[in-house]
């Protein structure tokens, strides 16, 4: 029940921290590891309405420090990040204000055998294994919680129509029609 978040903190860490108490109600032994570079958020000035970027970083760090069963590792060099990925079972990426352009960390996590919880937006439906990804339709804490619990339980993601055609799903449909 080891959950990993390893991205720029502006890409959904706040939404994950809001959902985390709900996850713990369902899975009290779940642990959250956060590996992120706070300076990236400061440098790119990705802030929340009404708060400066520095205030948003401070609020996220304070929230993370008071989050039960959570640890913050800060920025990690690539070899160490891969070790941390190996020690976890689910990679959660609620997504940021803009859709992901590629999702290198998500692809790495999936290659390391982690289950992925991510929004079905941007390039992610094209670069992730769609039949093994647990898709988020929103950043609602209840939905994030239910999706994480599904991933922990190992249930297959529920079938939802995809907005794009991607080759793994097209191949499965083609073979089903032919066979």
Image (tube, rainbow, N blue to C red):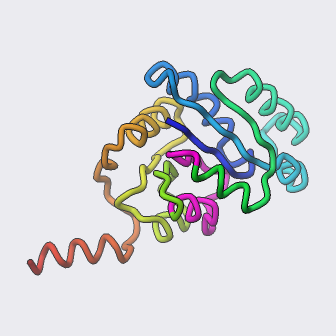
**Spot occupied by residue 172 in the image (x, y as percentages of width and height):** 24, 72
Q: Based on the displayed image, in which of its 4 quarters is residue 5 positioned? A: top right
Q: Quadrant of the C terminus?
A: bottom left
Above or below residue 26? Residue 39 is below
- Residue at (38, 73) in percent of width and height: 166
First to last magenta residue range: 87-110
**Spot occupied by residue 25 in the image (x, y as percentages of width and height):** 48, 19
**Spot occupied by residue 96 in the image (x, y as percentages of width and height):** 66, 50
Above or below residue 149? Residue 155 is below
Above or below residue 70? Residue 57 is below
Residues 146 and 52: in front is 146
**Spot occupied by residue 133 in the image (x, y as percentages of width and height):** 42, 55
In the picture provided, is 136 more to the left or to the right than 72?
left
In the picture provided, is 167 more to the left or to the right than 175?
right
Outermost residue toward the left in this view: 179
In the picture provided, is 134 more to the left or to the right than 109?
left
Q: Based on the displayed image, in which of its 4 quarters is residue 40 positioned? A: bottom right
């Amino acid at each position: 029940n080891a959950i990993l978040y390893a991205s720029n903190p502006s890409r959904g860490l706040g939404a994950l921290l809001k959902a985390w108490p709900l996850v713990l109600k369902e899975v009290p032994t779940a642990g959250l590891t956060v590996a992120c570079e706070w300076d990236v958020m400061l440098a790119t000035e990705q802030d929340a309405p009404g708060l400066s970027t520095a205030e948003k970083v401070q609020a996220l760090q304070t929230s993370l420090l008071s989050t039960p069963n959570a640890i913050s590792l800060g920025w990690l060099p690539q070899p160490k990040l891969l070790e941390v990925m190996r020690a976890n079972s689910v990679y959660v990426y609620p997504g940021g204000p803009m859709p992901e352009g590629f999702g290198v960390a998500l692809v790495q996590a999936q290659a390391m055998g982690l289950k992925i919880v991510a929004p079905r937006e941007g390039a992610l439906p094209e670069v992730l294994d769609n039949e093994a990804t647990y898709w988020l339709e929103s950043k609602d804490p209840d939905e994030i919680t239910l999706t994480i619990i599904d991933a922990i339980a190992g249930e297959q993601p529920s079938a939802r129509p995809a907005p794009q055609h991607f080759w793994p799903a097209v191949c499965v449909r083609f073979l089903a029609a032919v066979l």
